[in-house]
């Protein structure tokens, strides 16, 4: 089967790999579409990933084979995949399955090869069925929106003014879901003009340029002399966590959805005197993925405008060099097998 494989020193290389064999307790899925995630980019550019890794976890496809010990997933099921969890470690016992520390199994970032390939194998607990009226590209994007939903859910904020810092993939998804959930006004801070325009299309009420606008002054004007009720850091720029805290109002909630990779200084006085609540968001839950699929199915959420580029597996190495690694693409959607 064809796959885009990480080769150390060469980056992504398209290869013909042996067809996957499934164990008795696994299922085989024929991949329709896989989205290229920011974390795939970080892992490819980082040092940690092993030579030969197949990435890709934002996958939608159809179950084509089930092992003899699998009872709850049928052949023909259209599915997306999320990691399994043990249900007994401290993370799982607190209901936070994404923090499972015990034998967590996932595709593309864990022990099983990922969706930059014609087939993937998975455990049935990983399978989330896709509603009949949801197409495979939309389904492949559900996980990305679930990341955004997880950040919003963690803060417990349900309405009020919201600021999103950074209009990349996650920032745009956060804007869209804040709109779905009825937050107002939704403000975005983004230095790139095209991305500010995109944020408007995603539902931002006010767009700000952090290099031109005085964000503190704007925050106070927009919110009648207060800061924002909730602020979502999605830029990955290290100065922006402190900025997010400065821009939050009294009792405001700040959620870190980006990976900053470095220690950053924050104004703890500001944090304390406003009783700002600081959250960090990691991954998402099955429930949040199911919720996003439901919103897509109901027509509440159109995930597709996130896609900036489409490509085949053969084209991925070139698209990676020219569009992903240069920061020009928002979301690359791979067209791999028969789409639904
Ligand atoms: Zn992802
Ligand atoms: Zn666990």
Image (cartoon, rainbow, N blue to C red):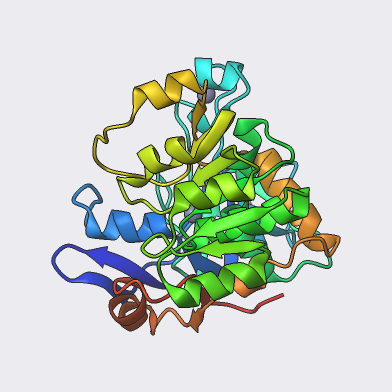
Side (left or right) of 81 relative to 12: right
Name the spot of residue 230 as percent of width and height, x first. 59, 39
Name the spot of residue 266 as percent of width and height, x first. 32, 31
- Which residue lies at the image location 38% right of the left edge and 76% below the top edge? 328
Work out which quarter of the rendered image holds the N terminus and state it: bottom left
Camera-nearest residue between 316 and 122? 316
When asked about the image quadrant of residue 32, the answer is bottom right
Camera-nearest residue between 288 and 171? 171
- Which residue lies at the image location 39% right of the left edge and 54% below the top edge? 39
Side (left or right) of 197 relative to 66: left
Camera-nearest residue between 58 and 326? 326
Q: Is residue 299 above or below residue 334?
A: above
Residue at the farthest right position: 298
Side (left or right) of 275 relative to 109: right
Camera-nearest residue between 118 and 185? 185
Name the spot of residue 9 as percent of width and height, x first. 13, 66
Residue 172 in sight:
yes
Work out which quarter of the rendered image holds the C terminus and state it: bottom right
Residue 26 in sight:
no
Q: Is residue 137 above or below residue 40?
A: below
């Amino acid at each position: 089967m064809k796959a885009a494989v990480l080769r150390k020193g060469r980056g992504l290389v398209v290869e013909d790999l042996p067809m996957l064999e499934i164990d008795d307790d696994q299922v085989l899925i024929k991949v329709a579409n896989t989205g290229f995630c920011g974390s795939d980019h970080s892992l490819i550019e980082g040092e940690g990933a092993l030579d030969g890794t197949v990435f890709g976890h934002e996958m939608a496809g159809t179950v084509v084979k089930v092992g003899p010990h699998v009872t709850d997933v049928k052949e023909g099921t259209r599915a997306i995949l999320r990691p399994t969890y043990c249900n007994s470690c401290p993370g799982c016992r607190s209901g936070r399955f994404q923090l499972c520390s015990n034998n967590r199994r996932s595709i593309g970032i864990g022990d099983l090869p990922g969706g930059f390939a014609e087939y993937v194998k998975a455990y049935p607990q990983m399978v989330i069925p896709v509603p009949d009226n949801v197409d495979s590209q939309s389904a492949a994007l559900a996980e990305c929106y679930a990341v955004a939903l997880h950040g919003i859910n963690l803060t417990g904020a349900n309405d009020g003014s919201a600021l999103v810092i950074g209009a990349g993939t996650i920032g745009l998804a956060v804007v869209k879901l804040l709109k779905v959930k009825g937050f107002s006004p939704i403000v975005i801070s983004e230095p790139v003009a095209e991305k500010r325009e995109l944020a408007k299309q995603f539902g931002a009420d006010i767009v700000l340029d952090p290099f031109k606008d005085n964000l503190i002054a704007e925050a106070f004007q927009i919110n009648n002399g207060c800061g924002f009720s909730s602020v979502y850091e999605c830029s990955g720029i290290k100065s922006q966590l402190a900025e997010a805290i400065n821009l939050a109002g009294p009792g405001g909630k700040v959620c870190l959805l980006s990976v900053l990779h470095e220690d950053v200084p924050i104004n703890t006085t500001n944090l304390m005197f406003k009783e700002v609540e600081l959250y960090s968001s990691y991954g998402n839950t099955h429930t949040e993925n199911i919720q996003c699929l439901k919103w897509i199915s109901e027509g509440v959420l159109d995930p597709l405008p996130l896609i900036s580029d489409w490509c085949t597996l053969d084209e991925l190495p070139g698209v990676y060099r020219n569009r992903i690694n240069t920061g020009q693409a928002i979301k690359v959607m791979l067209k791999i097998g028969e789409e639904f």
